[in-house]
Structures are given as C-alpha cells and as structure tokens.
Image (tube, coloured by chain):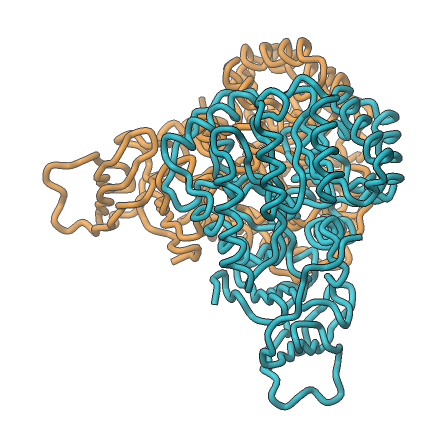
Chain colours: A cyan, B orange
Amino acid sequence: MRSTSHSPGPQARPILVSDALVWRKGRRNVLIAQGRIAAYDPAEPPPEALRIDGSGQVLLPGLVEAHTHLDKTLWGMGWRPNTAGPRLIDKIENERRVRREIGIDPERQSGRQVRLSVAKGSTLFRTHVDVDTECGLSGVEGVMRTREAHQAIMDMEIVAFPQSGLVTRPGTRELMDQALAMGADVVGGLDPCAIDRDPKQHLDIVFGLADRRGKPIDIHLHEPAELGGFSMEMIIERTQALGLQGRVTISHAFCLGMTDRSYARQLMEQLARERIAVMTHGAPSRPVPPVAECYEMGVVVCAGSDGIRDSWGPYGDGDMLERAMILGLRNNLRRDDEVEMALDVCTFGGARVMGREDYGLEVGCVADLVLLPAEAAAHAVVERPESRTVFKRGVIVARDGALV
Amino acid sequence: MRSTSHSPGPQARPILVSDALVWRKGRRNVLIAQGRIAAYDPAEPPPEALRIDGSGQVLLPGLVEAHTHLDKTLWGMGWRPNTAGPRLIDKIENERRVRREIGIDPERQSGRQVRLSVAKGSTLFRTHVDVDTECGLSGVEGVMRTREAHQAIMDMEIVAFPQSGLVTRPGTRELMDQALAMGADVVGGLDPCAIDRDPKQHLDIVFGLADRRGKPIDIHLHEPAELGGFSMEMIIERTQALGLQGRVTISHAFCLGMTDRSYARQLMEQLARERIAVMTHGAPSRPVPPVAECYEMGVVVCAGSDGIRDSWGPYGDGDMLERAMILGLRNNLRRDDEVEMALDVCTFGGARVMGREDYGLEVGCVADLVLLPAEAAAHAVVERPESRTVFKRGVIVARDGALV
C-alpha cells in the first residue's frame, strides 16, 4: 500500500465532542487532539479543550469524494441550458466546444467545487482532470493550484484523464506523462474499445505510464455488458502481469450490472483476487455494479459525485450523503445495515482506494470528521441535514453548511 | 372528465408578483386575485395588491403529489431501524406488525406529511389509504379528518387501497365499498396476480366497485415484465369494456420498463388509446416506465413520493422537486427540455390524472403556485432550493419551508 499523505494538523486547541453517537461505536465523548482522535471517553480531558455538545448528533468519518471532475464544473457560472446530444461522443465534443466558448477556468471552478463539497463534509477527494491536445496541461495546473490553496481543508488525488482519447489523439500520451511528472497522482484511462477503438494500445499506454512512473491507475469504463466485460478482462490481465494488485480502480464499471449474472460474478471474483476496486456513482439510468454483491465477494467499492453541474448534465451539488442516498435507492438498500453499507462506500471505500490507512474512527486515526444532527447513521443518509460541523485534521473547517 | 373540486379562495387581498420567470411564459408580472391568476402584466394593478418581488425567482404551478401513502408514514415518530425482509409480502406483513406494535395513527401521521409536503410546494395530493380486515376503515377515517382540517392549504383525493389483498381477505370488498360510500374518491387495487393469485376475480371486484360507485381506479402494479404485461392487458380490456377511458391509472407499471421493447410499446399504445395514465416514482432499483417514450406515445404520466419514511423504507421527505430530479436521473434526462419533462410529470401530469381542468399557469387558472429562487425551471429541479413561497387558491400558505 501507499503510505498516507495525511499529516496531523497544527497544534490547534484540543476539542471534546461530548455525547455524540459515533458511527458503529455508540454514544461517546470524543477527544480530538494534535489532529487525531486522541481518546474516547477520556477520564480527564484537558481543561483547555474546546467543548462541543454532540448530543442528538451523529459523528461520521469525513466523507470521501472518490470520483469527480473538479476542472469542469460550471458551478457559480450562472445557469446554462444544456443542449448536448445523447451519445457519449456528443458530450465529449460538446464539452470541448463549451470550454472554448465560455472559458471554464480549471483553477477557479475546482476551487468552487472543493469549497462547496468541504462545507458538506467531504475531506478527501480524487478528481479526474482532462488532459488533451487542446487544453494541454492547463487543467492539471489549475487543479494543482486549487489543491495547494485548499490543503488546510482537504486532501486530494489528481488523476491525469485522457477524456478525448489516447490512441486517437497523438501527443496525449506525452502530455499524460508530463502531468504525472509534475504532480498528478494517478494514471487515468477511458473506454478502451468504445472511445479509442484500440483496447490493446490504449491499455498498454495506461499501464505503461503507471509502471514507469510507479503510479496507480483509475480507468473510466462505461462500456456495457459483454463489451465492458472484455475490456475489464484486459485490465485484469495487465494488473496481474504487472503486479499492480491494490493499485487499480475501475470507475463506473457498468458492465458489472449486466444481465448475465454468472459472467458478472466471474469478473467480480477476479477483481477481488487482484484487489481491483470499483467506483460507482449509482447511476439510476444505467446498469451498475451491485454494491451488496461486491461487498459479499470482497470487491472494494468507492463512490463519487462524478461531474456536477457541467456540460454533461445539470445534476449534483457535491453532497456525498446525497450520493449515499442515491446508491441506496439504486441498489434497493432499505434496512439500516444496508443503508450503512452505502455510507461505507462513501467513506471507508474511498479512503481504502486512496490508501489512507489512518482514516476512520479508531483512536489514533486522523480527525477528519463530520458531526451532524441525526438519530442514526442511516438517518443521516436519508435526511441529509444541512447543518454539519466538518473537521479536517482536528480543526473545524466548516459549520452549518459554510466554511469557517 | 370529472369536474374540478377546486373552489376559489376567500376574498383575500390581491397579490402582484413582479418580474418572476413564469415557467414557459418568460419574465412577467403576475396578478393573483379571487383565488385565480387574474392577469399577466396588468396595466393598472389594484393599488391594494400585496407586492412580492419575484426577480431572480421562478414561478411554477403547485407541485402535485399524485401517489403517496399518507396513513402510514413514520415521520416525526423518531428514527426506527428498518429490518423488513426483501420480498413484497415480507414488507406487507412487517407493516401490519409495526402498525400494531407502535401505533401509527393515520390522522396524526397524514397531517404531518401533508404539512411537510405543502411547505415544500405540493398543493394537490392523491393518497392511497390501507383498507383491510385488521385496520378496517380507521385509515380512511383518519385521512379524511386530515383532509378536512387542511382543506385551506391543499386538495386531496383518497384511494381506498386493499394493501393486504382483496380476494384472499374476505370482507375487504365490503370495506372498500363502505370507504367509497363515506368519501373515498378512487378505487385502489394491487398486483392481481402476485398478491391475490386470482387476477380475474381481483380485477372484477375493482372494476365492479368503480362501475357501481361511479369512481375512477388507481391500481398498484409492481408485477414485472411479461407477468405485469398480462395483468395490464386485463386492466386495458376492462377499461375498454366498461367505457372507463380517462378514469384509470396504473401506478408503478414496472412492466413497461421490460426488456421486450416491442411488447412494451404495444402496451403503451393501448394505454394511450384507452387514456389510461401511468404513475411512476422513478424507482432507481427497478425497471420503470420510460417517461420520454410515454410522452411521445401520448400516455399521461404522473408521479408521487410513494411511501416516505415508513416501514417499507426510510427514504423521502415529500419534496416533489426532488422527485422530479429522481425521475430525471432515472430516465437520463439531461437537456433543459428533458428536465422540464420530469417537472411536467410532477405538476401537470398529476393534475391531469385528477381531472383538474383549471390547474396551470393560464389566466383564469386556480392560483396554486410555487415561487422559488432559480434561474430556470430545470435549475429549480436540480437545485431544489429550500426557500419556497407556496400559494393555495391565491393565498400564501407557506414561506421559506414553513407553513404560515
């Protein structure tokens, strides 16, 4: 596993959250000190600790936005009627056009979305950022500046993402390599068959970059059913051959929702064996990886907002509790333990994919936390209360839906 | 068509909403008087009119909650962990048990949900209310009292709903008949094959009651694919035979989302011909009627929250704008005109099903309206702003998410 990139917060004042319902741990007093969960029910909390009444509130680990596109949200740019055509390629081409016409500044826009999401409780992000022969590295550079400027309130992984194709756009591979050299953390990829029409070369480039730069991989795979299954097999083969177990994520993985359940389960078995994770946003209009079946078979699942308010579609506001609700609705998760599985995807799942070993609610974990009024964790998911206190490395960074 | 049961409001003070973006009509000054939309851009508005600044706001017709279960929400009863089994029959049996054990008072609970929903902009409801040999008519009586007590802020149709079966529970038919005699407006039904295991007798009872009492019909049909298609055919046959065109709704109609698109389209053609409406809540975990295809083929579509926070499941808060969003996500509606189709389902669709001819935004329509901060109708759907001014028959009944 990668080592954590968390570092404890500044020597801020300790905080004692009293009588909170800590997820899976019951009602506890929680001492936060030196950026970490220092103790539960301390006998003698430090007298200088800031006291927060947690009664009537649930304490969750920070929400994890494990798949979004920070560089291209239109949030804050006024309402823009969406007129894109129905196919994936229509949306990709429409997006490049819109980007030219209205000037979507990656730094400004990623900053807007980060602040919006942190206020709603996300403390850790993985964002895909477009790299292509038109925009070059401007997206990666802009998002890196946003990361730098917001490092006190969140952590972020940047995926160099060849949205417009790798094989079909000569020069993109070199740009991807530069992006990785200058600070992108993850090698992205996209529909090796459907977009690049050359799955072997596409995946050889992606895995070649990862191997050479020692970086993990996160591939968008929208390809449906047996076509997606074929691409997934090729990803599995390369993961095994290069010893990249635990370093590869397949985003969307719609093919795992295919009708042929026997083939889908066979694929899931191989994902579990090679420790390849799956990212789902629970797309209500597409077949999706079945979350409960993935858990049962040992496949790690994380989730993200995908794009919010962008040229692809108007939905979303970066709230990972709403994402857990949508996962719950999509996967027919109704019992409390099932709803909590959706929440697990939106918290621990993403942290696992990003290798954050000191994430969570154990003593010693980094104090990335969300405190919010609810009677149970499942209640928090279905109610999505606006009033949230967000802690990053033990420091309060947002309250009542606004950054502090 | 049934005649409207709207009656204009009291001789309240006229209201002039200035410079609002009226859905599909552009930026207008709207004069509301004597419970109706009196004029657009009046040259000389009455000097005594209350003036409301509508700039930066969108004006929609009142949202329509066309399918819910007011008698059994647990809203306001504290969080209750859900432990029901996976099958439909598990949930029906679990519900009767929970009802006995914790005392779900239909009057109190329906009142809670009505007030919650009106504050979010719903001005017209159709609710299914359980009628069975255990609870008898207590549900219908309770919801009728709620209707009476809240008549100033909403209109409501009550469906006598045989949740626990009709054929398999002797005595239920007689109770349904009594419910209709005492004020229920619509005859309900439920999965003629899957629950009662006797589709002919089930449907003969439902259509017999409707024929005898002169009432419309609204049948829950969860049955999937070809099984649901078979039940739907039997409903269509009876609608035609009894001349009930325009008087029958099929709720859920999951079978219209079946894989055999040719058979599904054949069914939709027949629904359009017999003017049988479809209710969908856009269930993300099930096949659903495709909204755009229904519109294209002339099938009227309405929507509802279904149950909210009840023994069936924990989701929902009665917000029909969120329902429009879920319909949009489920049906992959992304362009503005497509998102507005989802909103049309949650407004005009329900009004059409309930035969409200003076519903809408034309001059002369009853002034059931929602005013809310948004830049476009589609923006209102994806943003779901909390601050909403709700008008019922020209009187402001809610503001900023709370009843006035």
What residue sits 89% from the left and 39% below the top?
A: A273
Give residue A59's position: percent from left, percent from top: 67, 66
> In the rendered picture of this protein, how many numbered marks are placed on residues?
0
What residue sits 46% from the left and 39% below the top?
A: B381
Give residue B396's position: percent from left, percent from top: 33, 51
Horizontal side of residue A113 vs B107, given as left or right: left
Seen from the viewer's position, the closer of residues B319 and A369 is A369
Above or below B348: residue A55: below
Q: Inspect this view and state whether residue B401 appears.
A: yes
Q: Inspect this view and state whether residue B157 appears.
A: no
- Quadrant where the image shows the N terminus of chain B: top left
Residue B200 location, quadrant: top right
Seen from the viewer's position, the closer of residues A384 and A150 is A150
What residue sits 61% from the left and 15% below the top?
A: B239
Residue A222 location, quadrant: top right
Seen from the viewer's position, the closer of residues A349 and A285 is A349
Above or below B4: residue B259: above
Give residue B274's position: percent from left, percent from top: 55, 13
Horizontal side of residue A358 vs A398, given as left or right: right
Seen from the viewer's position, the closer of residues A213 and B26 is A213
Horizontal side of residue B327 vs B256, given as left or right: left
- Quadrant where the image shows the C terminus of chain B: bottom left
Give residue B367's position: percent from left, percent from top: 32, 39
